[in-house]
Amino acid sequence: MEMNYFVFGTNNMAQAVAYYDQLFDGTGLNKIHGQGRMTLWGNERFMFALAEPFDKNPASNGNGTMLGFHVDSIDEVNRLHKKALELGGSCEGEPGVRSNMHSAYIRDLDSNKICFYTRNN
């Protein structure tokens, strides 16, 4: 079994799409759908989406909920962490070694938590 897709809710689709368009630039995740209440980026193995909640209630982030993106190198972990902060995200953990992985943590513009990581070997 493997994860196929992940969806974050947003309360400001235009702002969130602009953030992720810039964050995903050069990562291999490409926008494949951007219409109505959902925008989707993906590659041959994984999809990530932003959605305005179907029930019309405000989107909220889950306490303890986090999405992890595995990347190819320590340099890419560091680059994405820095870029996420430059785009207005907030730091939830500076790049460093944790559990034999090089990882860094951010929150996006809707306070969703993301980890960028790579194996530390």
Image: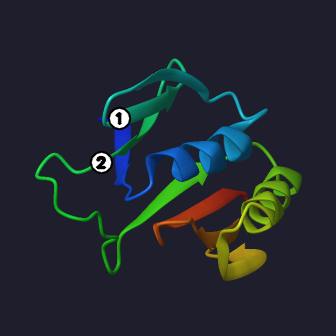
Q: Is residue 55 left or right of residue 85?
A: left
Depicted 8 relative to depicted 35: above or below: below
Residue 59, how many percent across, how many down? 29, 63
Q: Quadrant of residue 61?
A: bottom left
Q: Quadrant of residue 98?
A: bottom right
* Residue corresponding to mark 2: 52
Along the viewing direction, whichever of 120 and 9 lies nearer the viewer: 9
Kindly report the distance in space between the C-alpha atoms of the residues bearing marks 2 and 1. 7 Å
Q: Is residue 69 left or right of residue 98?
A: left
Mark nearer the N terminus (2 vs 1): 1
* Residue corresponding to mark 1: 38
Which three-letter amino acid code belongs to the residue tagged 2? Answer: Glu
Residue contact between numbered discs 2 and 1, judged by CB atoms under 8 Å: yes
Residue 110, how many percent across, how many down? 47, 66
State the residue lying farthest toward the left: 55
Q: Is residue 61 left or right of residue 79?
A: left
Along the viewing direction, whichever of 81 and 44 lies nearer the viewer: 81
Q: Residues within 10 Å of mark 1 (few under 14, many from 20)?
A: some
Q: Quadrant of the N terminus?
A: top left
Q: Quadrant of the C terminus?
A: bottom right
Residue 34, how many percent across, how many down? 45, 26
Q: Quadrant of residue 27?
A: top right
Depicted 78 relative to depicted 91: above or below: above
